[in-house]
Amino acid sequence: MSRLYHPDCREETKWREKTFKIIFGHDSVKGRVFDLILIITILFSVAIALLDSLDFLHVKYAKLFYTIEWVLTFVFTIEYIVRLMVIKNPLRFARSFYGIIDLFALLPMYLSIIFPGAQYLAVLRVLRILRIFEILHLRRYTRESSVLLDSLYNSWRKILVFLLAMLAIITVFGAIIYLIEGPKNGFTSIPLSMYWALVSVSTVGFGDLAPVTPWGRIVASVLILIGYGIIAVPTGIYTAELATSLRRKKDGRACESCGASGHEPNANYCDQCGAKLPEK
């Protein structure tokens, strides 16, 4: 159980201790039942938001869906408040990954009071399913995801340079196609032409705007070829950084029994033959 959620038995009352074990504990029967009910409720609330977006269902059951969404929001609000009450450091939990997700799961319905339609963002509640990693004791896989985030952080400068270069290309080609095609062919402004250039260089090609003059088509062809040539650049940058991060993460100790290396830093036994690894 994470230290973040560990209660201080000397300070917490018995009901807080029991509630804490049910809400944050995943080993007891009551804790597993709570987790199961919570996951089912989350999936049900997401399903309601999806169904409410269908016009033929919204017309018939709009009031029912709206009522159910508010009831579920009230339930999740109570649950969030209880989590804050039974934990040793409420502010730390509120700022944690799961605490932020829990808060975002509550906001859509309250925002819908001011911004109609915001209730459809209730689908954000599906992110709470990530707790399945805690429930099934798969937290080591969530730690592995830190390698992906670290690699993205370490490569953001190179990716930023790439994006700025792409912005320059899009601006130049947008201006060129605007001069060639002009408003008569649908390119009514340079920003709109830049949108066309972005769609073309990314090889998406929505087809809502298309050059009709020979020179315009030549420019479009060149831009598409440029897109094919550079579309793999950010992927290559990130992949190279990821490979570097993985090499840093691996343990350099070699197994004395089979000679295998590249173990996890906190590994005590070889993942190939099971022999005990030498001490660091």
Image (tube, rainbow, N blue to C red):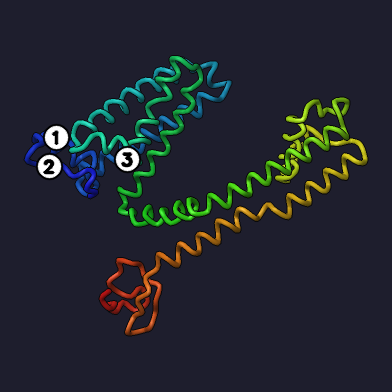
What's the residue type where badge 2 is placed? Asp
Disc 2: CA contacts within 10 A as few (<14), some (14-19) or many (>=20): few
Residue on which disc 2 sits: 8
Residue 233 is drawn in which quadrant? bottom right
Residue 234 position, x and y percent, is 61, 53
Residue on which disc 1 sits: 16
**SS assignment at label 1:** helix
What's the residue type where badge 3 is placed? Ser
Residue 33, placed above or below residue 78 = below
What's the residue type where badge 1 is placed? Arg
How far apart in space, not on screen, are marks 2 and 1 (Cα)? 10 Å
Residue 78 position, x and y percent, is 27, 26
Left or right: residue 86 compared with residue 201:
left
Tell me which label, 3 or 1, sits earlier in the chain: 1
How far apart in space, not on screen, are marks 2 and 3 (Cα)? 19 Å
Residue 81 position, x and y percent, is 25, 28
Left or right: residue 265 compared with residue 15:
right
Residue 96 marker: 3
**Rendered residue at 43%/24% (across/down):** 108
**Rendered residue at 35%/38% (across/down):** 39
Residue 235 is drawn in which quadrant? bottom right
Residue 183 position, x and y percent, is 85, 25
